[in-house]
Every structure is written in structure tokens, then in C-alpha cells.
Amino acid sequence: MNIKQTLFFLVGTFALSAPLSAGLIATGQCAGVSPCTAVLDNWATIANLGTFLDGVTHSVTGQDSLGQILYTGTLRSAVYRNSLNNQLDFYYQFVNNPTSLDAISRITMTSFGAFTTDVGYTTQDIDGTSGGGSPVKSNFVQNATLMQAPSLANRPSQGTVGFNFGSGSAPADAIDPGETTRILVIRTNALAYTTGATSTLNGAVATYQTFAPTNIPEPGTYALMGAGLVALGLAHRKQR
């Protein structure tokens, strides 16, 4: 194997290890009610399909440009490994406190660029009523009095996935004070995760660290890459 052949080998190895860039929700597209062309899935049995990996809970405060607090609440996020395909599912839920002054109209998540994303929500409890365990689960809830499902989801840019609640034609679907979202789901083709960010938006924006997919080569990829480097070294030595 000469140096040129070895370089082609290494490039092919990296290409095979990279995730697919096409998505069920592609950049600039959306799913949900009009003007979108698809309906968000309700994965009623998704709680039976995953193994909990990590979770985080944040107390949220949303302030406008003048420093006025428009809303407070609780943001829960978790990542699960789907037992059907070994890929990762990301879960989110926001609770708008009854004392908030404003509703929430949109929640966005980053960074999901270069990964397949399918979005929906579930009405089934993900981690049980008590959460807990090690690592600590995020205590998602499904028994709140007022719960809102998203009206649509989209990928306005490559890295962002967003869920809308209400619009000019359906403002009643927003997350009003005292309301809780259904558990929002982003299913991916990722095999590993890292830190990401989630934002709640209305007249204010509050952003907190959650989870996002990442591309980490599997052990077999490292072995192929190592073999290529060894071959490259041998070829270089032989030419000398």
C-alpha cells in the first residue's frame, strides 16, 4: 500500500464513521399543524423503549431587556438510549410557575447539526413518578392539571430544533402560568452525547445547559484508523 492509497483509506474510514446529515426534519423544514404539512407524533409507549443515561433540572428565570422577570419555572432534560436501535433520544419538559407574568411560546434546543432528527412528544411518564436512581433522573411529570402539547416543531437552522406552543391563530396553546408541557422528544441517529443548550422564549429568553448529540468514533473506527497510520508509516519507511 503506497502513501496515496493509505490516505484514501483514512479518508474512507472517517467518512464511514460520520453520522448521516439528512434528517426526517431537514434544515428549514417543520412538522405540525398548518402551515406545516405533517403532524407531530405522540409516542405513547416511548417510556418502554429507552435506558436512562443522564439528566439535569434547572430553575428558570426569564427577564426582558429592562430586567423585569416575566416568568419563572422548571426545565427538565434527559438523554436515553433507545433499546431498539442503540441510538439516543433527548427529552425535555418545562413547567411555567403559576406566579409567572407571561406565557412561553417557543422552546429551542441546540446543537443538533449533522444528525438525523425526528420530533414529537409523549403523554406517558418517562422515568416514573419518583425519578431518583443513579445517575439521578429528571422527575418528568405527566399528571399536572394543565398540560400543553407542541403545535409544531422545526429546524430553522442546521443546529437548532424548536418547538412552538401557540401562534397568532392559536394563542391558547401557549404555555401559560401554571401550565406544564408534555414531554418533548427529539430522536436522533447519534450514539454519544455532550453538553447542549435549551432556551425558553417569549418576550424574554432564558438559556440553560442541557444535552446534545455528538459524533465519537466507535472502537472499531479507531482500530481501522490505527491500521491506516501503521501502513502509512511502513510505506514512508519503504520509500526512504
Image (cartoon, grey):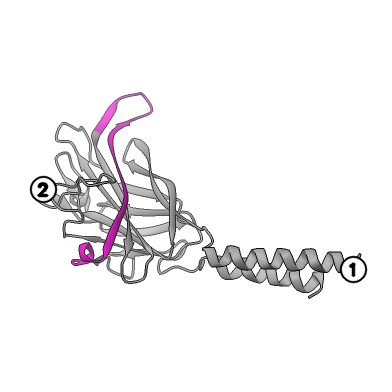
- x and y, in percent, of residue 135 in the image: 29, 46
- Secondary element type, mark 1: helix
- x and y, in percent, of residue 204 in the image: 34, 35
* Residue nearer the viewer, 77 or 38: 77
Q: For marks 2 and 1, give the CA distance.
A: 72 Å
Count the numbered circles shown. 2
* Residue nearer the viewer, 172 or 193: 193
User: Which residue of the protein is positioned furthest toward the top in this rendering?
Assistant: 67
Q: In this rendering, would 235 be left or right of 138?
A: right
Q: Which residue is identified by label 2?
A: 144
What amino acid is labelled 2 in the image? Ala
Residue 186 shows which numbered tag?
A: none
Determine which quarter of the picture holds residue 42: bottom left
Residue drawn at x 14%, y 40% as measured from the top left: 178
Residue drawn at x 46%, y 61% as measured from the top left: 28
Q: Which residue is identified by label 1?
A: 239
Give the foreground label among 2 and 1.
Answer: 1
Q: Is residue 13 visible?
A: yes
- x and y, in percent, of residue 67 in the image: 34, 24
Majority secondary structure of magenta residues: strand
Disc 2 residue crowd, few under 14, some 14–19, many 20+, Cα 10 Å: few
Q: Which residues are magenta?
A: 44-71
What amino acid is labelled 1 in the image? Gln
Determine which quarter of the picture holds residue 32: bottom left
Residue drawn at x 37%, y 38% as measured from the top left: 208
Q: In this rendering, would 222 be left or right of 59?
A: right
The image shows residue 113, relative to residue 75, as above or below, that is below
